[in-house]
Amino acid sequence: MALYAGIDCGTQGTKVVIVDSQQGAILGEGSAPHRLISDSNGRREQEADWWIEALIVAFHQAVAQAQVDPLEIQALGVSGQQHGFVPLDEQGNVLHSVKLWCDTETAEENALLLQQLGGVKGSLAKLGLMVATGYTASKILWFKSHHPALWARLHTVLLPHDYLNFWLTGERVAEYGDASGTGLLNVRTRQWDKATVDLIDNTGRLWQALPPLKSAESCIGTLRPEAAAKLGLSPATRVSTGGGDNMMAAIGCGNIAAGTVTMSLGTSGTLFAWSGEPVSAESEMIAGFCSSTNGWLPLICTMNVTSATTAIQTLLNEDIAGFNALLAQATPGAGGVEMLPFFNGERVPQLPHARASLHNLDSDNFTRANLCMAVVESATYGLRYGIELFRRQGINAREIRLTGGGARSAGWRQIVADVMGCPVVCLNVKEAAALGGAIQAIWATRLADRPEQDARALLAELCQRFVSLDPATHTRPDASRQEQYDALYQRYLQRLQQAYPEVQL
């Protein structure tokens, strides 16, 4: 056996997988939850120490389930929730609770920074993407403004996965994929953007605090003796660069070449695809991130997917099985019932203050089944809006790989295939980001040992070995329903523009 570990430090918890690179199999898994600091002003934070505590618990769980000697684990790869701000002093102490991707307390700072960049167009021109409140940049400006004494001690800016790497190895480094979500990186050149950094702090402190950038296939070091002892590993265990959770999930989904789109039917909806060149970023709705495979990972996020379906499910007092049974009773178009599913505002298109609404009801079509169909269809139309944005960038899908809770519904999978006009399939492995970390660790280790290898070919071989699709979920579009949904999608767009004329179609 040749053993490796993948770690995913998410918002809700940390997950660990132990894999055998020869079998191409996951031998053991572990997980541990994280607490969340939350306030009505938009504050969403965690303590970095909580991640370490969860990592140790989850790691020992995974080793125990795998029934292996942890001293045989050769390397680790870390995935982490994107955008969080971990400020360190020179001694490596964390100076403040970590503001997370979902923190909106820094909205005012982000608006100021976006204005200084020249608005949306200026941000796209300078960085290749639009800085958003969730990104790291506004968190840094907030920290400087609200905690000047702590700011004076700032030595290093790290992201969540960078911090785990620091705890593991003592190295203060970043990786292009995760760094592209800071709002401080020019995603086209893969370099920190000094002009943007100087808008936040022109004294040089922030510029000096930005860590050196590493390419995705690198090993950044070996374990500190203290970290090795807590995890039961050898100090010779290597650590790869790791990356953000979306970047690592792309590896864990095998989304490393053109033609595949990963679509998450989770609380929110996520679409991402691999690209060999940066997107032209005509639209701020596409986050043109770098990938953790030395390419790019254009990404789109919608706000209302299973959060919307759960609202209707709760209203009708149905469990998942009951909801899916009602869905199966309805026909495409939901008997004419139309929904705009913006229970949480919307990000794509940008309608932060939008509200959900029902339209075209009458005494015949106002049924439980049609309500279920209308919410699923409208959530799916929102994702097609994103797919159309991709297509305008020349990013086309030959296959959509579905993840998230909604993907477990056969009825919803068929609707996605019909609305998108594209085959869909689910993965056998659910922890794609942790698996991506393990695959990257194998990739980096093998290239470190034999640098003459073709890096892209090796990664493709590893993904082929580890990433398996569930044939029982493979769903092709039905030609007649696809034609129906093309017309129904146009009806949805008309309804959208009637309600929100500012939306550009």
Image: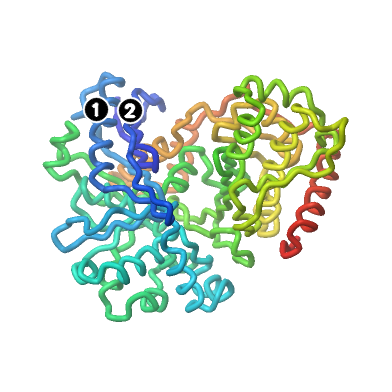
Q: Give me the residue at 30% from left, 58% from top.
A: 158
Instruction: Name the disc covering residue 371, or none.
Output: none
Q: Percent x, y for residue 286?
A: 59, 58
Q: Which residue type does callout 1 highlight?
A: His
Task: Tell me the number on the disc at residue 60.
Answer: 1
Q: Quadrant of the N terminus?
A: top left
Identify the element where label 1 is drawn. helix
**154 relative to 166, above or below:** below
Label 1, residues with CA under 10 Å away: few <14, some 14-19, many ≥20: many
* Mark-to-mark CA distance, 2 and 1: 7 Å
Residue that appears at 61% across and 52% down: 345
Question: Residue drawn at (39%, 51%), measured in percent from left and top?
Answer: 39
Whether residue 6 can be seen here:
no
- Give residue 413's position: percent from left, percent from top: 67, 31
- Please tell me which residue lies in front, 344 or 139: 344
Residue 365, image quadrant: top right
What is the secondary structure assignment of the residue under circle 2? Answer: strand
